[in-house]
């Protein structure tokens, strides 16, 4: 029988390699999926440019971070990028509204089929990704500063006397805290404020909302501001946590869409839950459980292989499989969003 | 955000969602010269590149344009005829490339004897799992069915994993620097073009079964996913096609010679010396003439090979174009357009929408697979690491939209034009950068930064072209012709 230390070791191991990374990745996906789902719920199209909007928001964050750092402004132990988020969101929101005015509003006014808007978003995706590369180039960039770890592996080992260390990066903790704050603020906004209620009404039934005097232009504008804010925060948190590479944001599109659809597209609660479902399945299915098993099982049962269900290269496959299963079993998603 | 989303009228929703562009509206009559003139202009542009930039560049653009045109036709079948949003062109292209390896590469016997049996056993296990699942799906009902299927898949996975793992290790251990994979069948590579179509069609059938019948955006996201998975599999399953280690030196199709051999052939030397007779005659002495001829032979052989490819691709393009045009003008084509323009009405007339959509989705993907195999043949190597969605999926979309969705000639023109712009945008970007930075300090950070801008410039141009065409010529350069009798 494994004794208490082994159990604790196994628990710490899982927390360190599965729970913490999945929680922060899930938060980033949740924020991204919230943006996609909002645009879908109100503007009624799947925005393929959302990944590159995230990249653009991150680019703005990095630029402003550099300006702040050059002027000697930092945020103590927290990354300076958090300070830069506010002006970056403003800049991204302006760009998003400009894009809407120049591209999407034309098709919306003519009541074009949603799929035409999807193709237009592909055009926007091309241009945004080009602009991001114009500004940042294509190389890897890290822009985090301040204290790197909240909990260090070695200190944790010394403190607890366990074999396994627990490391929590500051960026991971920030991701979770910021996500929590943003999600709560968004739900309060949607449920309590007049504008939020107008947005929900517009999403539910456009004609009825127009009939009761809701200004559609205002709803659309607020939607883009929120989508840009969510994209910037999600992108910047992802970039802080991993690193900034322009093309990774295009690859994030698939898990983000999967998250939005799993939860029920057009449904904010669903997007958050979907984000965590996708992230936890990705991390849990690609983690090698060998060490975990050696702590819990008697020595003679120790496994030979890595005990890994799928190699980490197939993490895209996991979001896709989740997507397919949801499509087959419950096309509306967990929270019964709109059927795409 | 809405719990009562169901009450939005489902009829208007689907009808609106599927029709890409309303074709039934009154159209302006277009000049019959429009298509020939457009192609003439395109040809002139290629000739200009050949004359002012260089001949090899022009021929390279021509070859990739032909392949792009085939891809665009495949996508046009799906989007233009049926309004299906396929965002997985990249995956089908790569499957075609895989076919080129699997068909034409000679088999690696050591690897097959080391791991062939394990691989075959894995195949049997996979088939057994699928068969059992299919049987259970029909034989059982309700919760018991889900449970039984789940158990079968888990047990099957546990049995499969060690057998497959050992086979893979055995195969990848065989001379990993040169082979380390099972090789192919050693058949002529032209066979692979057909096989590429079959591979792509099989995967398209699977994905279509799942995602068709829902709203079109769903198909888009599902195909986006399948494409990523195909690439992930090709990158990581080294036993199949060496993954990111690439398979190089693929055989050429029969009529295309190798440059080195061609340079030795007497008839080719005669041809080149006759072609450049006046230039050779002007040479001062025999030694200089020899050197001159040698260079001409090298250049000529390279052009000859490119032209041979171009002829081969043109033949394929013309066959597929003829088939597509015939299909579009047949009762089948009319039915497809009827389904696209009004699903409700077509359904009321007794057309099986889902089955027709599946059919056209599979056909279109097969054409893309053929083009993918042709592209790998042209490159002579299969490099899974180079596939990315912007270049292989969304660029093809731009071709179809710009060319004119629903019109096969439009798709061909789009393939030519967009590939031309895609290639030439980079030198154009470099030129602009040069003009901008010509009187700048060569050591400043901004100057260095500007030098990197040329590459992404083409992305910018593509987005701009797509948005402008969608806005001001939404039916493309060569709009779909609709005949009302």
Image (cartoon, grey):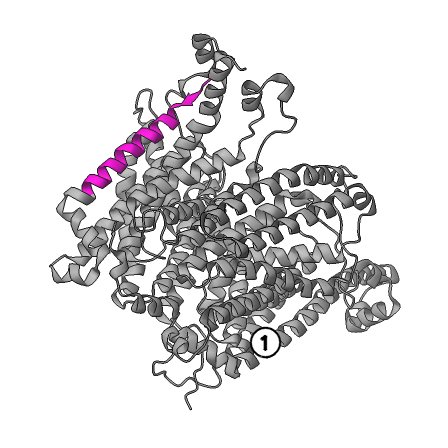
A200 horizontally vs A294: left or right: left
The mark total stands at 1
The residue wearing badge 1 is B321
In this rendering, does residue B392 appear at all?
Answer: no
Q: Residue at x 44, y 35 (%)?
A: A280
**Quadrant in which the C terminus of chain B is drawn:** bottom left
Q: Nearer the viewer, residue A198 or A67?
A: A198
Q: Nearer the viewer, residue B247 or B232?
A: B232
Question: Magenta residues: mostly which secondary structure?
Answer: helix
| Image position of A67 with respect to A153: above or below | below
Residue A13 in the image, given as x and y percentages of width and height: 49, 21
Picture quarter containing residue A176?
top left
Please state the extent of the stretch shown in magenta in the rendering: A165-189
A82 horizontally vs B415: left or right: left
Disc 1 chain ID: B
Residue B238 in the image, given as x and y percentages of width and height: 68, 43
Is the residue marked by circle 1 packed among few (<14), some (14-19), or many (20+) residues within 10 Å? Answer: many
Based on the picture, tell me whether residue B481 belongs to the magenta stretch: no
Residue A160 in the image, given as x and y percentages of width and height: 44, 10
Based on the picture, tell me whether residue A186 belongs to the magenta stretch: yes
Q: Residue at x 35, y 70 (%)?
A: B15
Q: Nearer the viewer, residue A81 or A120?
A: A120
Dot 1 falls on a residue whose secondary structure is helix
A79 horizontally vs B383: left or right: left
In this rendering, does residue B219 appear at all?
Answer: yes
Residue B39 in the image, given as x and y percentages of width and height: 54, 76
| Image position of B326 with respect to B205: above or below | below
| Image position of A216 with respect to B116: above or below | below
Q: Nearer the viewer, residue A217 or A260?
A: A260
């Amino acid at each position: 029988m494994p004794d208490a230390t082994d159990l604790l070791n196994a628990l710490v191991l899982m927390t360190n390699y599965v729970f913490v990374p999945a929680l922060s990745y899930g938060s980033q996906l949740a924020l991204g999926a919230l943006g996609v789902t909002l645009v879908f719920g109100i503007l009624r199209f799947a925005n393929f440019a959302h990944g590159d909007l995230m990249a653009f928001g991150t680019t703005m964050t990095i630029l402003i971070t550099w300006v702040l750092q050059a002027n000697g402004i930092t945020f103590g132990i927290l990354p300076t990028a958090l300070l830069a988020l506010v002006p970056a969101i403003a800049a991204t929101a302006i760009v998003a509204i400009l894009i809407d005015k120049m591209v999407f509003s034309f098709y919306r006014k003519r009541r074009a089929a949603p799929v035409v808007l999807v193709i237009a978003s592909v055009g926007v995706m091309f241009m945004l990704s080009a602009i991001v590369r114009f500004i940042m180039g294509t190389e890897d960039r890290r822009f985090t500063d301040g204290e790197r770890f909240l909990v260090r592996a070695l200190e944790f080992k010394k403190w607890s006397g366990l074999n396994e260390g627990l490391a929590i990066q500051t960026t991971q903790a920030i991701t979770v805290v910021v996500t929590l704050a943003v999600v709560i603020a968004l739900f309060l906004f949607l449920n309590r404020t007049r504008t939020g209620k107008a947005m929900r009404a517009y999403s539910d039934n456009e004609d009825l909302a127009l009939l009761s005097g809701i200004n559609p232009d205002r709803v659309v504008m607020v939607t883009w501001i929120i989508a840009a804010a969510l994209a910037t925060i999600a992108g910047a948190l992802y970039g802080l946590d991993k690193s900034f590479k322009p093309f990774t944001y295009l690859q994030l599109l698939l898990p983000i869409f999967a998250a939005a659809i799993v939860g029920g597209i057009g449904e904010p609660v669903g997007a958050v839950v979907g984000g965590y479902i996708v992230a936890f399945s990705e991390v849990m299915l690609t983690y090698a459980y060998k060490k975990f098993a050696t702590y819990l099982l008697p020595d003679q049962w120790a496994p030979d292989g890595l005990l890994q269900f799928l190699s980490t290269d197939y993490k895209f496959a996991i979001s896709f499989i989740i997507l397919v299963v949801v499509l087959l079993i419950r096309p509306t998603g967990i929270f019964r969003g709109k059927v795409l | 955000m809405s719990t009562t989303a169901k009450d939005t009228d489902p009829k208007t929703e689907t009808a609106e969602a599927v029709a890409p562009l309303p074709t039934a509206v009154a159209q302006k009559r277009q000049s019959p010269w429009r298509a020939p003139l457009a192609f003439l202009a395109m040809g002139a542009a290629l000739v200009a590149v050949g004359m002012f930039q260089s001949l090899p560049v022009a021929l390279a653009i021509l070859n990739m344009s032909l392949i792009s045109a085939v891809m665009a036709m495949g996508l046009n079948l799906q989007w233009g005829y049926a309004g299906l949003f396929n965002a997985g062109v990249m995956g089908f292209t790569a499957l075609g490339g895989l076919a080129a390896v699997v068909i034409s590469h000679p088999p690696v016997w050591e690897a097959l004897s080391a791991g062939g049996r394990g691989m075959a056993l894995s195949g049997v296990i996979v088939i057994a799992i699928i068969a059992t699942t299919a049987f259970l799906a029909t034989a059982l009902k309700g919760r018991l069915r889900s449970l039984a299927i789940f158990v079968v898949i888990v047990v099957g996975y546990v049995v499969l994993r060690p057998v497959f793992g050992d086979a893979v290790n055995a195969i990848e251990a065989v001379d990993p620097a040169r082979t380390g994979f099972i090789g192919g069948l050693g058949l002529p590579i032209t066979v692979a073009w057909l096989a590429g179509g079959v591979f792509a069609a099989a995967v398209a059938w699977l994905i279509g079964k799942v995602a068709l019948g829902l709203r079109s955006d769903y198909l888009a996201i599902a195909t986006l996913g399948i494409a990523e998975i195909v690439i992930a599999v090709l990158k990581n399953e080294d036993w199949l096609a060496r993954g990111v280690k690439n398979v190089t030196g693929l055989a050429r199709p029969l009529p295309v010679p190798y440059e080195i051999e061609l340079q030795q052939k007497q008839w080719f030397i005669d041809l080149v010396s006759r072609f450049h007779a006046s230039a050779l005659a002007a040479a001062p002495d025999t030694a200089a003439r020899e050197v001159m001829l040698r260079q001409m032979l090298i250049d000529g052989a390279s052009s000859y090979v490119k032209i041979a490819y171009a002829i081969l691709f043109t033949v394929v393009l013309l066959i597929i174009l003829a088939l597509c045009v015939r299909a579009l003008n047949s009762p089948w084509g009319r039915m497809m357009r009827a389904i696209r323009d009004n699903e409700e009405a077509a359904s009321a007339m007794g057309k099986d929408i889902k089955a027709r959509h599946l059919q056209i989705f599979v056909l279109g993907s097969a054409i893309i697979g053929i083009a993918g195999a042709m592209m790998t043949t042209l490159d002579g190597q299969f490099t899974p690491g180079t596939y990315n969605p912007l270049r292989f999926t969304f660029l093809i979309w731009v071709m179809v939209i710009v060319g004119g969705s629903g019109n096969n000639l439009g798709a061909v023109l789009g393939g030519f034009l967009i590939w031309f712009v895609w290639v030439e945008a980079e030198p154009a970007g470099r030129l602009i950068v040069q003009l901008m930075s010509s009187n700048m300090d060569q050591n400043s950070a901004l100057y260095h930064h500007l030098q990197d801008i040329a590459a992404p410039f083409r992305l910018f141009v593509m987005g701009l072209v797509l948005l402008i065409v969608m806005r001001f010529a939404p039916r493309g350069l060569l709009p779909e012709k609709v005949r009302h009798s």
